[in-house]
Image: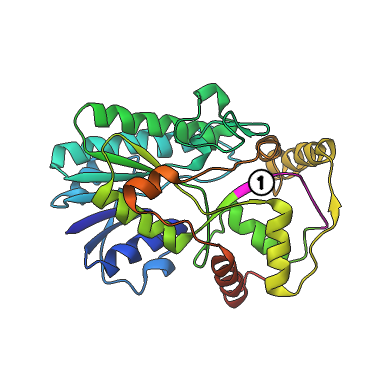
């Protein structure tokens, strides 16, 4: 099997590439001229330069591949030019799926996000736990990242209806090693290690081991149904529970002060104004991130368990690996 992988230089994509290599797949990895190659430096893989926003380069790079894993995404909670995010996440996905159809690719596994699920302020409309069937629309998406991923997922479903064999996977919040940027979720761990968590807000996430999540992508290739989506989740945890686990791993103190929503919102407004608009830097706290925090992003992965053979495992090991990796690579 010759697998074409986008996003392999990033966090989750590097885990997906390794999971495929463990299965004996040959790899062709899409990179850009400016890509940081540290995450794939030890992989035996063919690297091809291209850009998701350049359909010609994508089609050329994909030639001869029989499977595609589209993991790449612009994952930021603040961006100076929102259209840049839509060009990458939405139009890039459209171009890739068109190229896959033209090249006769056997199957595409598209990495969406749990952000596209139907959450309410208390969790979801069904028992406070969201799943693939929870009612949701574009109007429910907060911020450009969520909107772009929701729109890209709809592009994938349109392609499936048009005859492209595409399976959608929805990772929750991956944690583990090689989070080089780091992602917004990795930043939680780095900030904790830097003692930048004097207080916490009442919110919740589902954390998933990045290594297990990558294996779930392979399961989707082998067992998923075209045109279907599958949540790849782990443990539902409040932010306070996550910080408490990090405290147990590191010996550092977990915050005991809970910050009211109004203060968290005010912090987001100030940070976005000063760092984002005036200094042109990505804020540590954004208005959209605080608004998203009002929803407990708790999910269940029953569908993936029943159809893919997915296993929900504790994330303590992944948190420990993440801590060790960030410490060992100069982030702290």
Note whether 145 is above or below 243 in the view shown. Answer: above
Residue occupying the point 43% across, 29% down = 151
Residue occupying the point 70% across, 52% down = 239
Picture quarter containing residue 104?
top left
**Residue 273 in sight here:** yes
Picture quarter containing residue 55?
top left
Note whether 298 is above or below 176 in the view shown. Answer: above
Screen quadrant of the N terminus: bottom left
User: Residue 203 lies in magenta, yes or no?
Assistant: yes
Which residue is label 1 attached to? 204
User: Residue 24 lies in magenta, yes or no?
Assistant: no
Task: Residue 234 in the image: state x and y as whole percent.
Answer: 52, 54
Left or right position of 216 against 237: left
Screen quadrant of the C terminus: bottom right
Task: Residue 254 in the image: state x and y as whole percent.
Answer: 79, 63
Picture quarter containing residue 106?
top left
Q: Nearer the viewer, residue 313 or 34?
A: 313
Q: Nearer the viewer, residue 133 or 42?
A: 133
- Label 1, residues with CA under 10 Å away: few <14, some 14-19, many ≥20: many
Residue interval drawn in magenta: 198-205
Numbered disc total: 1
């Amino acid at each position: 099997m010759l697998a074409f992988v986008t996003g392999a230089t990033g966090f989750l994509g590097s885990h997906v590439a390794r999971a495929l290599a463990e299965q004996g797949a040959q790899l062709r990895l899409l990179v850009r001229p400016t890509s940081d190659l540290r995450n794939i430096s030890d992989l035996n893989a063919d690297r091809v330069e291209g850009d998701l926003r350049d359909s010609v380069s994508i089609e050329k790079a994909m030639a001869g591949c029989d499977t595609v894993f589209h993991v790449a995404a612009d994952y930021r909670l603040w961006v100076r030019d929102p259209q840049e995010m839509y060009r990458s996440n939405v139009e890039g996905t459209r171009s890739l799926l068109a190229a896959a159809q033209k090249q006769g690719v056997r199957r595409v596994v598209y990495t969406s996000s749990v952000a596209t699920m139907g959450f309410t302020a208390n969790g979801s409309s069904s028992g406070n736990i969201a799943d693939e069937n929870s009612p949701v629309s574009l109007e429910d998406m907060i911020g450009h990242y969520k909107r772009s991923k929701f729109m890209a997922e709809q592009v994938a479903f349109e392609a499936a209806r048009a005859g492209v064999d595409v399976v959608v996977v929805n990772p929750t919040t991956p944690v583990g090693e090689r989070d080089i940027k780091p992602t917004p979720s990795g930043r939680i761990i780095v900030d904790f290690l830097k003692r930048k968590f004097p207080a916490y807000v009442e919110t919740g996430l589902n954390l998933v081991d990045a290594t297990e999540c990558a294996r779930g992508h392979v399961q989707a290739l082998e067992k998923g149904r075209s045109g279907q989506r599958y949540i790849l989740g782990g443990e539902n945890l409040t932010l306070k529970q996550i910080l408490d686990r990090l405290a147990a791993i590191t010996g550092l103190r977990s915050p005991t002060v809970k910050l009211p929503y109004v203060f968290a919102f005010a912090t987001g407004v100030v940070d976005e104004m000063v760092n984002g608009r005036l200094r042109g830097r990505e804020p540590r706290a954004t208005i959209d991130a605080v608004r998203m925090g009002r929803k407990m992003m708790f999910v269940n992965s029953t569908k993936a368990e029943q159809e893919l053979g997915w296993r929900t495992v504790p994330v303590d090991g992944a948190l420990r690996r993440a801590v060790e990796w960030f410490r060992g690579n100069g982030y702290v």
